[in-house]
Amino acid sequence: MRIILAGPRGFCAGVNMAIESLRLAIEAFGTPLYVYHEIVHNKWVVEGFMRQGVVFVDDLAEVPEGAHLLYSAHGAPPEIRQQAAQRGLQTIDATCPLVTKVHLEAVRFARKGYTIVLIGHAGHDEVVGTMGEAPGAIRLVQTAADVDRLEVTDPSKVAYLTQTTLSVDDAAEIIARLRHRFPQIVGPAREDICYATQNRQEAVRVLAREADVVLVVGSQNSSNSQRLAELARAQNVRARLIDGPADIDLTWFSGGETVAITAGASAPENVVQQCVALLQERFGATVESRMIRLEDLRFPLPKPLRKQS
Ligand code: SF4
């Protein structure tokens, strides 16, 4: 067996910042410490913090008045921030700046009177947060077919935004359909699908061509991990989204395959290495690292934690 380790893979700058923020917040304020939604969409990361006394909540009523609350990498809608202020919570904002950028674009377009078409997945934390920034102005579309069903009051005043973790190809198809229906549509000054999503997809697009199987390390609720598995399948390569080595079914392999391994932006590298070790032990796999694009982006920590780092 031959393993191709895809690069870049795993943690992005937003996830690194959010995890480091939570680690420093625990050091500074102790536990229990509360986080609105999962800090990032990964089972290992979330369970690790739960063992340290972090409480993840979907409802601020679960947070005692005056307690510390951290907003996750996916952000939080304004109504949650208002509730937190009313309850006297001490908040730390670990929202990824690239998610905040989309929020600000939504506010800007709404102020100018645009109907905003948000391309994204219903119910995803990031989409809920972005829609909350301009609730009356945003319509969600998930597919190109949804575009045909859109009804807007002024077709000459339509803007679009996208979730940061979409499939680049799917988003391009939907944007093309939007441009066809609304020729005057405007978009963000710079692409909303983030650099980490694009780079991980590009690596899979290139390396899946050489692979018989693609393993994507990531949790089922991780949007960008799901997209990586879909992308490999779209190239007629068998792909599995796995949380870790326990999800690997050895009957998937005969032992002579080329296996490309990647990881979603919230999946820890040590879990990737555990998967590699399992295949090395069972199939004597050789390992080759292939870096398609270098990344060196870092995001600043939230202000209340900067002194401590
Ligand atoms: S995937 Fe992109 S938008 Fe999401 S946290 Fe990472 S860098 Fe930020």
Image (spheres, rainbow, N blue to C red):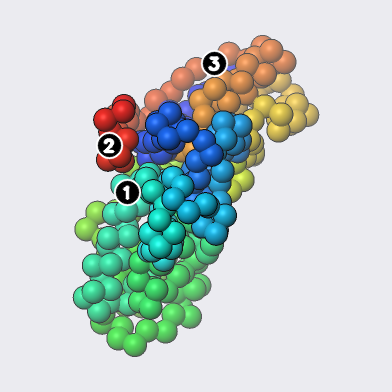
Residue bearing mark 3: 287
When asked about the image quadrant of residue 114, the answer is: bottom left
Query: Mark 3 or mark 1, which is nearer the start of the sequence?
Result: 1
Q: Residues within 10 Å of mark 2 (few under 14, many from 20)?
A: some
Residue 156 - label: none
Inspect the image, locate mark 2, and give the three-letter code of the amino acid beneath it: Pro
Percent across and percent down for residue 84 are: 42, 58
Q: Nearer the viewer, residue 253 or 224?
A: 224
Residue located at (35% from left, 71% from top): 134
How far apart marks 3 and 2 lie (CA) works out to: 34 Å
In the structure shown, which secondary structural element does the residue marked by tag 3 occupy?
A: strand
Query: Mark 1 or mark 2, which is nearer the start of the sequence?
Result: 1
Residue bearing mark 2: 300
Inspect the image, locate mark 3, and give the three-letter code of the amino acid beneath it: Val
Inspect the image, locate mark 1, and give the three-letter code of the amino acid beneath it: Leu
- Whether pointer 2 and pointer 1 mark residues with C-beta atoms closer than 8 Å, the reply is no
The quarter of the picture where the N terminus appears is top right
Residue bearing mark 1: 98
Residue located at (54% from left, 39% from top): 32
Is the residue indicated by label 1 positioned so its CB lies within 8 Å of ligand 1?
yes
In the structure shown, which secondary structural element does the residue marked by tag 2 occupy?
A: loop
Q: Nearer the viewer, residue 42 or 170?
A: 42
How far apart marks 2 and 1 lie (CA) works out to: 12 Å
Residue located at (40% from left, 31% from top): 28
Is residue 233 found left or right of 150 in the rendered image?
A: right
When asked about the image quadrant of residue 290, the answer is: top left
